[in-house]
Amino acid sequence: MLAEFPILQIVDENGNLVNEQYKEQITEELVKQFYYHIIRIRTFDRKAVSLQRQGRLGTYAPFEGQEASQVGSALALLEDDWIFPTYRDHGATLTFGAGMTRTLLYWNGRMEGCVPEDGKKIFPPAVPIATQIPHAAGAAIAEKRKGTKNAAIAYFGDGATSEGDFHEGLNFASVFQAPVVFFNQNNGFAISVPIEKQMNSRTIAQKALAYNMPGIRIDGNDVFAVYFHTMEALNRGRTGGGPTLIEAVTWRYGAHTTADDPTKYRNQSKSETIRQTRDPLLRIERYMKSNGFWDEKWIQEITEEIATEIEEAVKEMGDYPKADVNDLFDHVFEQPTWTIAKQKEDYLRLIGREV
């Protein structure tokens, strides 16, 4: 089965082009776009971890190591497409156009962080595992019924493939030939459970066979492979070819969240080896240098620009008006049920506020 689902690459670990089919499409402008967004979201991710350690953000889900998967796939989307992220895909949503301030507000427990920028079809991050997958199928079916060419992408980890929502979402998308890409980031662990203990399948991509849809495995640390194969899958969906399952094989360096200790269940020395060999940023740097795209002045400029953008977002988050405790209760239902009303009354009394 592994032979039927090889890991597809376009640029290898040393920055060499290994698939000439895409040579003409890989322009300096595109490569620099990849580099900019990978640097941007990695810098944001590290800043967010630092803010959590300072007590300025809540528990945070880092993604360092998975940037190529998120940047490449998000850049393949068109302006009016849908994106259905998990709690770990803010790298993708930032690339797609989500604002940094609102992203920080989300990690600060603010409902404003779930509101996308105007005109952006960004679903609130899904914390329950795999629940966004049927939603993505439904949005894609709706776009097809309306006669648009808009597509959807759903992000999820390897653990999500053990949930019923994964299978239900793929089945509905297959039946209705929905223009949706199911984008799996397989980093080998569902929190502490290694993939070989989650499933007996040799790959995640092969699960597409049960739903009669294309399934491919790609090198998730190769931003070129992610971008072009995701774009091909989206375009196939737009033109009536139905859904696609993509398994992006990648590796996250750090913990599942800032409340987790990965040394308890995996050998962290592997992370250091991958950082020195297969790191997505290192790979694109090698490609840029070997193809004459490396520009120290430009690198310095964008690094400073990104740092300023992040610091401004952090300040805006800090200057935001204090959260209203009533928001916890008033937006659960259109009309509060008696149980919600009682919870609100009890809580306000507990904190010494008037009911």
Image (tube, rainbow, N blue to C red):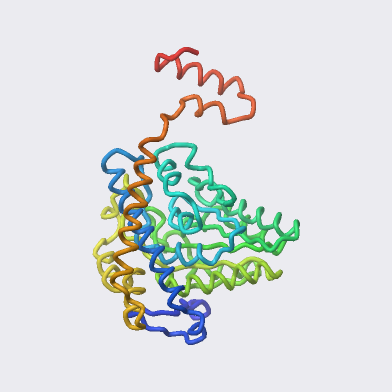
- Near-viewer residue (344 or 262): 344
Residue 92 visible at all: yes
Of all residues shown, which one is farthest toward the bottom?
20
Q: Based on the displayed image, in which of its 4 quarters is residue 206 positioned?
A: bottom right
Residue 40 drawn above or below residue 101 = below
Q: Horizontal and vertical percent for residue 253?
A: 31, 60
Q: Horizontal and vertical percent for residue 239?
A: 70, 70
Q: Horizontal and vertical percent for residue 282?
A: 31, 71
In the figure, is residue 256 to the left or right of 124?
left
Question: What residue is drawn where x is 47% and y is 74%?
Answer: 225
- Near-viewer residue (333 or 247): 333
In the figure, is residue 258 to the left or right of 166?
left
Q: Horizontal and vertical percent for residue 318?
A: 35, 37
Question: What residue is drawn where x is 44% and y is 42%?
Answer: 106
In the figure, is residue 18 to the left or right of 155?
left
Residue 13 visible at all: no
Question: What residue is drawn where x is 53% and y is 79%?
Answer: 4
Tally the numbered discs: 0
